[in-house]
Image (cartoon, helix red, strand yellow):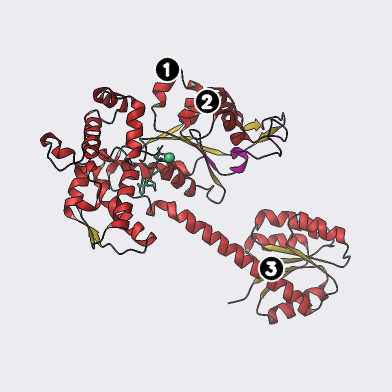
Amino acid sequence: MPEGKILVVDDDSLIKDFLKESLSRQNHQVDLASSGDEALEKIRGTEYDIILSDIRMPKMSGMELLKAAGRFSPDAKIMLMTAYGTIDNAVEAMKLGAFDYITKPFSADDIALKIKKALAYKKLEWENRLLRSEIAGKYRFKNVVGKSPQMKKIFEQVEIVADSRSSVLITGESGTGKELIAKAIHYNSPRKEQPFIAINCAALPEGLIESELFGHERGAFTGAIRTTRGKFEQAAGGTLLLDEISEIPSSLQAKLLRVLQEKEFEKVGSDKSIQVDVRIISTSNQDLNELVEKGKFREDLFYRLNVIPIHIPPLRERREDIIPLSEHFLKKFNTDNSRSVEGISEEVFQMFMEYFWPGNVRELENFIERAVVTSKGKVLLPEDFPKGVFLEKGLNKIDVGNSLDDMEKSLILKTLESCGGNKTKAAGILGISTRTLRNKLSEYGIKRE
Ligand SMILES: Nc1ncnc2c1ncn2[C@@H]1O[C@H](COP(=O)(O)OP(=O)(O)OP(=O)(O)O)[C@@H](O)[C@H]1O
Ligand SMILES: [Mg+2]
């Protein structure tokens, strides 16, 4: 195995012979070219680690070769040799993307050292890329669990849409895995090496969202002490996740629409347009169609965001996923907490299979995490899980031995179940406000607020 594949480009045959000799002795594989044209020919056919080129040659100069090589062989490190070792030449070469330069005359040791450095750097780059693709692999379905026909269909959709830059709208109840699917799309797309940036539209006060999205110019408003880059700029070339898009204030809907249509925007307090290439994925746990009908969400924006719709059904509608998910989380939390719980009992699975799962996969994940951390045995048993939650079956009997809290929890969950998860309806039956209901659910750790 050669150390590195090197192309030497020079019209001076003395230099070529010298380099061929000395670099071959270092166990590199060396090819020679006498002109820029000949070099390009070779670059098209072979992948070089390093291109070592003279700056001054007849016809095509080293600088021109540098530019052209960047197109055909973006991974090769280019090193220029110059007999006119002026700083100007070197600076210009580096600006154009040269990795390094060396001034003639040089010794065999000089060049050996520089080549070694460039190869080490290339290796590092390669390892970095590998590492990144490992992170990407995390979302390459291995960690997205699902055996149900509904999830299998979603995996197919993800694979198909990943290649395009069309906007995707992912809908589903809280905790169904919308963000996870958004990441799976990004990390399976050609943009995977570029940033994945998320913004939660529900978590920011109205006044802040605009500058978060688009950035602001220094002095645009009180407290804007420096110019900032917004999420759109940060996500350039990659994917921007607009989480909980239904919460975006109406004042911003028009601005967002414009970015989607024209692919450009201005920072707050600036009138200079910035061009961006960003793929948009948005999520919502609300029915955007309904919001459009009520006039709360712009119809034109909805259509722009909803080019490709992906709906993730609630966990209770795909019960085949419960056991594989449970096992997946068991493994994960064993590893995370250095525990060695071996399994989950049959009774627990039975409870799981009958439960309503208002908090969906997140709720299941939380249950398993807590159980793995607190359990004393080798297998997770019903007593390792919160009592009230799985009590609903016995509710009709009203046994002594349950606390009021447990009964309340159980009544709420059962009512919610009978309303198919509709919180407004359930709150009506229970005689409490939807807000109170939401608060109670989040108290039980069922819904993330
Ligand atoms: N199919 C799945 N396989 C593995 N883990 C999953 C799956 N679906 C969801 N999860 C896990 O469940 C948790 C909740 O998922 P996620 O945050 O993507 O949900 P969400 O739909 O965005 O929720 P919310 O609407 O509350 O923001 C995450 O920890 C996620 O990793
Ligand atoms: Mg989310």
Cα–Cα gap, marks 1 and 3? 61 Å
Image x and y of residue 421, in percent: 28, 31
* Magenta extent: 215-242
Q: Is the distance from the Cβ of mark 3 to the nearest ligand 1 atom less than 8 Å?
A: no
Classify mark 2: helix, strand or loop. Answer: loop
Rendering quarter of residue 21? bottom right
Residue 14 in percent (x, y) is at 82, 76
Query: Mark 1 sits on what residue?
Result: 294
Give the SS element for disc 1.
Answer: loop
Screen quadrant of the C terminus? top left
Question: Does the image show residue 50?
Answer: yes
Snapshot quadrant of residue 360:
top left
Q: Amino acid at mark 1?
A: Lys
**Any part of residue 277 in sight:** no
**Chief secondary structure of the magenta span?**
loop
Query: What quarter of the picture does the N terminus occupy?
Result: bottom right
**Front residue of this view, candidates 78 and 30:** 78
Q: Are marks 1 and 2 in contact (CB under 8 Å)?
A: no
Q: Which residue is mark 3?
A: 118
- For label 3, the SS is helix
Of residue 223 and residue 183, the one placed in the foreground of this image is: 223
Q: Are circles 1 and 3 on residues that touch, CB within 8 Å?
A: no
Q: Are marks 3 and 2 in contact (CB under 8 Å)?
A: no
Q: Is residue 10 left or right of residue 419?
A: right
The mark lying in front, picked from 3 and 2, is: 2
